[in-house]
Image (cartoon, rainbow, N blue to C red):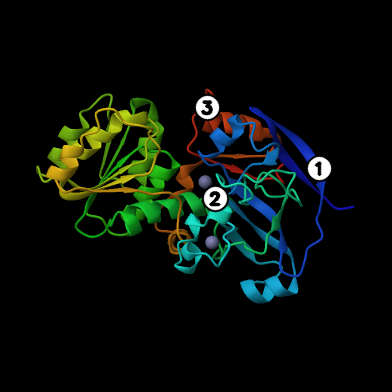
Amino acid sequence: MATALAAVAVEPRRTELREFPLPEIPPDAGLLRIEAAGMCGSDWPMYLSAKPGPRILGHEMIGIIEKLGDVARARWGVAEGDVVALEEYLPCGHCEYCRSGEYRSCLETDTRVAGSVRYGSTPLTQAPALWGGYAQYLYMHPRTVLHRVPPGIKPHVAAMALPLGNGFQWAYLDGGAGPGKTVVIMGPGQQGLGCLVAAKAAGSASIIVAGLARDAHRLAVAKELGADHCVAVDQEDLAGAVTRATGGRLADIVIDASSGGAATVNPALGLLRKRGTLIMAARKGAIAGFDLDQVINKQILLRGTRGHSYAAVELALQTMAAGTLPLERISTHVIGLSEVDAGLKMIGGESQVRSIHITVAPWKS
Ligand SMILES: [Zn+2]
Ligand SMILES: [Zn+2]
């Protein structure tokens, strides 16, 4: 019988390889042969959690459609053999959010809501178990959101469709990056670099990327992707650098994609010109001493953002197809299923090895 090998997160901090039977495919569903799955920072808290029980992590898949039901073939407009990128969301299609194109907010695919389903976080107990990207095959649920991958894009680059999609959502669609704009990006991880790619593709006038001295490699990649200035904030004063780079005008848009806690928030406000936009893309918890008066005095637009729209992922794929930016530099590791546990520890910063974007290639031996 045909089976799929998968790396299962069985308990906090432990994954093990297991084999699963390939499911029967109903008329409105499909089966994806996974070519590559990107590791995401959000895998880390899931790897540490005992709830909701054993599951296959990984929610940023690209692959080749292996099997399709007749209804799915007609609905999705694709055929067996097509290369597609999947979103993590499995939206209901009929709620207010879905009806207005904001399906990433749909409660039926929100992992905090009981009974919801989403790729990379749904437990094995929900049939047919193959809900995650760190596996050879994935069950394509009837509510799958897919994108065609343009030809010629290597799997480890195509696997960045969602983090780059986040970049287009946060920097361009939500933040308004574009001609004449100065954009500051705090945090040079894969999401921050995704914002850089989007801000660059949108034609921003000046882009400043901030990180720490230990992020030297990430900042070097930011330079290659077109950042005008890179600042290690533990070695150089960021406010001074932004003031100098803008002739005192300060930034139009600041995106905080840094994992460094609440300490970055008030400094981020200080980098903005009047009526600038602060995009908060990383959770910070409750913030003591939040400088609300600065938000009011400078009439700052403060916006929390999460995930991506359909349009944002399409823009990411088009940017890959254009081939004008050295996106492969963001990819630091391609690993097999047996290395998923080590990869997750890299994501969580518990490894000596520093990574930016890690791709799991489930057929790699
Ligand atoms: Zn993700
Ligand atoms: Zn919905």
- Disc 3 vs disc 1: which is toward the camera? 1
- The first of marks 2 and 3 along the sequence is 2
Amino acid type for the residue under numbered disc 2: Asp
- Is residue 143 or residue 247 the one in the foreground? 143
Gap in angstroms between the C-alphas marked 2 and 3: 32 Å
Q: Is residue 186 left or right of residue 112?
A: left
- Disc 1 vs disc 2: which is toward the camera? 2
Please give the name of the residue rendered at 64% of the width and 72% of the height, measured from the top-left corner.
78
Amino acid type for the residue under numbered disc 1: Glu
The answer to whether 114 is drawn above or below residue 66 in the figure is above
Q: Which residue is mark 3?
A: 353
Res 104 seen here: yes
- Is residue 331 or residue 118 the one in the foreground? 118
Please give the name of the residue rendered at 74% of the width and 74% of the height, measured from the top-left corner.
70
Say what secondary structure mark 2 lies in. Answer: loop
Say what secondary structure mark 1 lies in. Answer: strand
Please give the name of the residue rendered at 60% of the width and 33% of the height, measured from the top-left corner.
47
Res 316 quadrant in image = bottom left
The answer to whether 138 is drawn above or below residue 285 in the figure is below
Amino acid type for the residue under numbered disc 3: Val
Q: Which residue is mark 1?
A: 19
Marks 3 and 1: CB-CB under 8 Å?
Answer: no
Gap in angstroms between the C-alphas marked 1 and 2: 27 Å
Q: Is residue 138 left or right of residue 306?
A: right
**Where does the image place residue 13, in percent across and percent down from the top left?**
63, 27
**Where does the image place residue 233, in percent across and percent down from the top left?**
27, 29
**Where does the image place residue 185, in percent across and percent down from the top left?**
31, 42
Q: Quadrant of ligand 2?
A: bottom right
- Is residue 120 or residue 204 the one in the foreground? 120
- The first of marks 3 and 1 along the sequence is 1
Gap in angstroms between the C-alphas marked 3 and 1: 29 Å
Report the disc number at residue 110: 2
